[in-house]
Image: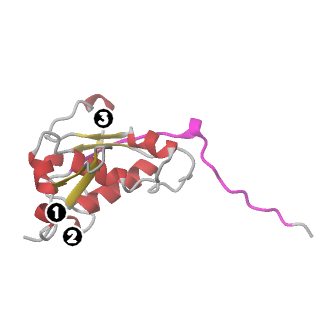
């Protein structure tokens, strides 16, 4: 007796329907909001998730300069970069980056480090992330829906 085998469903690139989502990052813990953003960018929240297809949402993050760190991480979290020259290792703290010229880089880099490493797909998915330091964004025409990350879990906001 022959049984009919079930087929695995794989999303095609033509079948993908991208949505637009706005996240207000004010007083949200950096790592927790970054993991939710990375999940949304990859499409892992969808039942039709396919690892090799860009089927995630377009994510807009506002108020990135007002993100929170738990504990003493705002002063002790160190970010490193290398100039490419011998002895060219530079270090800055999260506090200096948030008070500097591009405070949205803290959240952008946190999300980037949660994406698959060295992957053309991850680079394409990162282009769907739009981070803004202030409360304004130019994507009103896409009619984005608001995602309340603070209400998802009580740990998403730091205790004060």
Based on the displayed image, in which of its 4 quarters is residue 70 positioned? bottom left
Q: Which mark is residue 143?
A: 3
Q: Residue at x 39, y 51 (%)?
A: 40
Q: Residue at x 46, y 56 (%)?
A: 44
As for residue 101 lying within the magenta part, the answer is no
In the rendered image, the quadrant that contains the N terminus is bottom right
Circle 1 residue: 69
Q: Give the alpha-carbon distance from disc 3 to disc 2, as whole Å.
A: 28 Å
Circle 2 residue: 154
In the rendered image, the quadrant that contains the C terminus is bottom left
Q: Nearer the viewer, residue 88 or 69?
A: 88
Q: Residue at x 27, y 50 (%)?
A: 81
Q: Is tag 3's residue or tag 1's residue first in the polypeptide sequence?
A: 1
Instruction: Name the spot of residue 136 as percent of width and height, x first.
Output: 16, 36
Element on which disc 2 rests: helix
Specify the segment rendered in magenta: 3-24
């Amino acid at each position: 007796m022959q049984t009919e085998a079930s087929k695995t469903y794989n999303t095609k690139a033509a079948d993908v329907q991208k949505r637009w989502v706005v996240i207000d990052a004010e007083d949200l813990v950096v790592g927790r909001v970054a993991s939710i953003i990375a999940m949304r960018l990859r499409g892992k929240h969808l039942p039709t998730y396919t690892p090799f297809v860009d089927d995630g949402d377009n994510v807009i993050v506002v108020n990135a300069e007002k993100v929170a760190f738990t504990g003493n991480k705002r002063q002790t979290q160190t970010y490193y970069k290398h100039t490419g020259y011998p002895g060219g290792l530079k270090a800055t703290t999260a506090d200096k980056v948030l008070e500097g010229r591009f405070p949205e880089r803290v959240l952008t880099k946190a999300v980037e480090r949660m994406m698959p490493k060295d992957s053309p797909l991850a680079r394409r998915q990162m282009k769907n992330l739009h981070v803004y330091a202030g409360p304004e964004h130019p994507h009103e025409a896409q009619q984005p829906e608001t995602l309340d990350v603070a209400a998802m879990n009580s740990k998403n906001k730091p205790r004060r």
